[in-house]
Amino acid sequence: MNNECEDCATPVMELAQWPDVMRLRVGGVIIARQRPPTARGTAFVALEDEGGVVNVILRPEGSRRIARCCVVDSS
């Protein structure tokens, strides 16, 4: 458990070592995204890195901040 770098992403394999209430930065490839109409702006994202998959809940204020990262490329 090493959080020396505030700008570094925590690998998925290390997430279980941290308390549930801890704010951490994660990164990876978005493998699934859901924005149900009944969720009032909340988005659900599955991120995958080389160590596994993490499910992320983005509240409306967080969703707006990273909206450009959650765009689906349909090409």
Image (cartoon, rainbow, N blue to C red):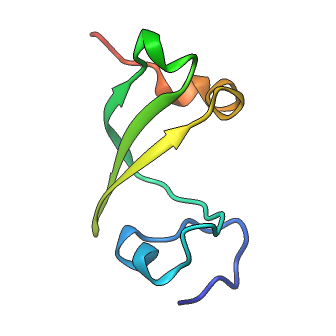
Tell me which residue sits at (41%, 52%) in the image: 28
Q: Where is residue 70 in the image (x, y as percent from the top left)?
A: 48, 26
Tell me which residue sits at (72%, 29%) in the image: 61
Position of residue 65 in the picture relative to residue 9 (left or right): right
Position of residue 74 in the picture relative to residue 70 (left or right): left
Q: Quadrant of residue 51?
A: bottom left
Q: Residue furthest bottom?
A: 1
Q: Position of residue 21 (x, y in %)?
A: 62, 67
Above or below, 42 relative to 6: above
Above or below, 8 relative to 54: below
Position of residue 42 in the picture relative to residue 61 (left or right): left
Tell me which residue sits at (34%, 75%) in the image: 13
Q: Position of residue 45 (x, y in %)?
A: 40, 37
Q: Quadrant of residue 11?
A: bottom left
Q: Where is residue 17 in the image (x, y as percent from the top left)?
A: 46, 84
Of residue 17 and residue 5, the one placed in the foreground of this image is 17
Q: Residue furthest front?
A: 38
Q: In which quarter of the image is the C terminus?
A: top left
Of residue 38 and residue 63, the one placed in the foreground of this image is 38
